[in-house]
Image (tube, grey):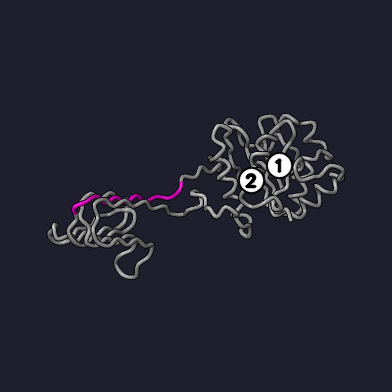
Amino acid sequence: MEEIFINYRTGDGEKTAALIDQELVRRFGRDHVFRASRSIAPGRAYPDTLLRALRGSSALLAVIGPDWINFQSRLRDPEDWVRKEIEEAFACALPVVPILDGRRMDRLDKAQLPPELALLADIQSIPFDTADPESGLRRIVDAVADIIPGLHDRTGVESPARTSDSVNNSVGDASGTTVQARDFTGDVGGTVIKDVQGSNIHTGSGDIYQNSRHVSGGRHVSGDGMTYFEGDNHGGVRNQFGGPDRREDDGR
């Protein structure tokens, strides 16, 4: 039943692994997240439990802390469980997401990895800054939701980072009707404000049509989106358009 397998090394990243586990459990439920120290009950044989959980998962999160690469002797041991879990994930064609635990963590270097784990250096990773855990957890939850779209978020709250287009509108001293929509058939797409009293407008790029009786003719302004005004405008209208700010670890 576990669809998210958290891979980590004791002594290097287990605190971050516990934070990730806690947030994923809160969002998706205990039955969908496997972390060995929590999920394996006392008295159970851990090798079989680990492999069975891993093979039944849909993704593996590999928490890589500052000293992870320094465990060279263990990483090069085929019986090392951190290595075995990642190798098994590769063998099962599971998505593997490296979580770089620490503000100063660098991308992995293939030359420092055993050949069986060299692929980790080519995989897009997620930086996790322990000084700002909320941001890291949000990105991890978003990545998991993208990889496993069938997961149900029990909180019912969509992360702001998953919103493809964010629009913030404020209208001051408005009397009349205000309508906001993403798509219109015809010349207008975005926001329509009728019979509004005001004059302050802030927008990005796209087309803005102002047809107020206080303006002779029509004015077209280039911005991010499209806004149409009709009627006397004596208040404040501000539109702010933009997408999420995502830091991608793409090696550039």
Q: Quick one: which residue is furthest to the bottom in this view? A: 185
Which callout, 2 or 1, points to the residue nearer the camera? 2
Horizontally, residue 45 falls left or right of residue 247, namely right
In front of the other: 235 or 104:
235
- Dot 1: within a 10 Å radius of its alpha carbon, few (fewer than 14), some, or many (20 or more) residues? some
x, y percent for residue 24: 64, 47
Percent position of residue 233, x then y: 19, 55
Q: Which mark is residue 26?
A: none
Disc 2 and disc 1: Cα gap in Å? Answer: 10 Å
Q: First in sequence, mark 2 or 1: give its number.
A: 1
Report the label total.
2
**Residue occupied by mark 1:** 118
Boundaries of the magenta span: 234-244
Give me the residue at 13% from left, 57% from top: 214
Rendered residue at 81%/52% (across/down)? 52
For label 2, the SS is: loop
Q: As rendered, which of 236 and 245 lies closer to the eye?
A: 236
Sort mark 2 into few (<14), some (14-19) or many (20+) by Cα contacts within 10 Å: some
* Residue where numbered disc 2 is placed: 123
Q: Is residue 239 magenta?
A: yes
Residue under the image location 46 percent in, 45 percent down = 245
Amino acid carrying label 1: it is: Ala
Give the quadrant of the N terminus: bottom right
Task: Determine whether the residue tagged by mark 1 lies in a helix, strand or loop.
Answer: helix
Q: Is residue 247 above or below residue 4?
A: above
Answer left or right for 132 relative to 45. Answer: left
Res. 38 image quadrant: top right
In x, y percent, where is residue 35? Answer: 73, 44
